[in-house]
């Protein structure tokens, strides 16, 4: 008899999305628009959440979007989304974006943020049966612990 799995590791739902910066993605200076990058990050986070829960998931909040470097027309952008923690009705996903020129091999971190998602049940109500996360690496364990602090911070911001 097979044993029912009661948790998932962050790597089981990790998503890597790749885009090329095209002229329609940029401002008049040829620099990738922040809103377009956040859109790509949100899509990667949504796929990560849906892979984890096996349900339709929607964005509840985006915390601390930090733009570190610019990407330009022709750059290859890689967006990585990984679960940090699931709570009773929500889950947190860390999303990092990297860019590189086609002639280079080294990716540069251009943005990172924490996304909170909720899963919807079939009747479009927020689901409360989320599979717990079991971190395995040192970094995953650090992100798991700090996710609770970020959640409390988000809750305080929403109350004020």
Image: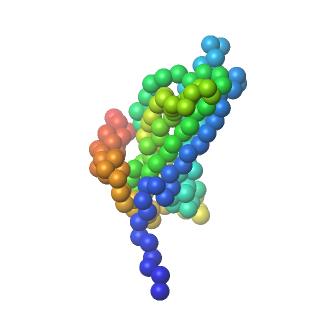
Q: Position of residue 115 (x, y in %)?
A: 46, 42
Q: Residue furthest top?
A: 29
The residue that appears at 59% across and 43% down in the rendered structure is 17
Residue found at x 56% / y 62%: 54
Relative vertical location of residue 28 with respect to residue 14 in this rendering, above or below = above
Q: Say if 37 sits above or below 5 in the image.
A: above
| Quadrant where the image shows the C terminus | top left
Residue 19 rendering spot, x and y as whole percentages: 64, 36
Q: Is residue 148 left or right of residue 41?
A: left
Q: Nearer the viewer, residue 45 or 106?
A: 106
Whether residue 150 is visible: yes
Residue drawn at 56 percent across, 37 percent down: 78
Q: Is residue 4 left or right of residue 41?
A: left
Residue 130 lies, in percent from the top left, at: 45, 62
Using the image, determine if residue 33 lies above or below residue 132. Answer: above
The foreground one among 129 and 11 is 11
**Left or right of residue 100: residue 131:** left
């Amino acid at each position: 008899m097979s044993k029912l799995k009661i948790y998932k590791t962050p790597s089981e739902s990790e998503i890597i999305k790749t885009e090329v910066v095209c002229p329609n993605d940029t401002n008049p200076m040829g620099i990738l628009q922040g809103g377009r990058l956040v859109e790509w990050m949100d899509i990667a986070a949504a796929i990560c959440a849906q892979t984890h829960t096996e349900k339709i998931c929607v964005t509840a909040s985006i915390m601390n979007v930090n733009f570190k470097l610019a990407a330009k027309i022709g750059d290859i952008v890689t967006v990585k989304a990984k679960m940090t923690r699931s709570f009773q009705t929500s889950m947190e996903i860390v999303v990092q974006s990297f860019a590189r020129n086609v002639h280079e091999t080294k990716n540069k971190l251009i943005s990172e943020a924490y996304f909170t998602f909720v899963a919807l049940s079939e009747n479009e109500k927020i689901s409360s049966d989320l599979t717990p996360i079991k971190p395995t690496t040192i970094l995953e364990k650090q992100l798991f612990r700090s996710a609770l602090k970020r959640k409390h911070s988000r809750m305080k911001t929403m109350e004020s």
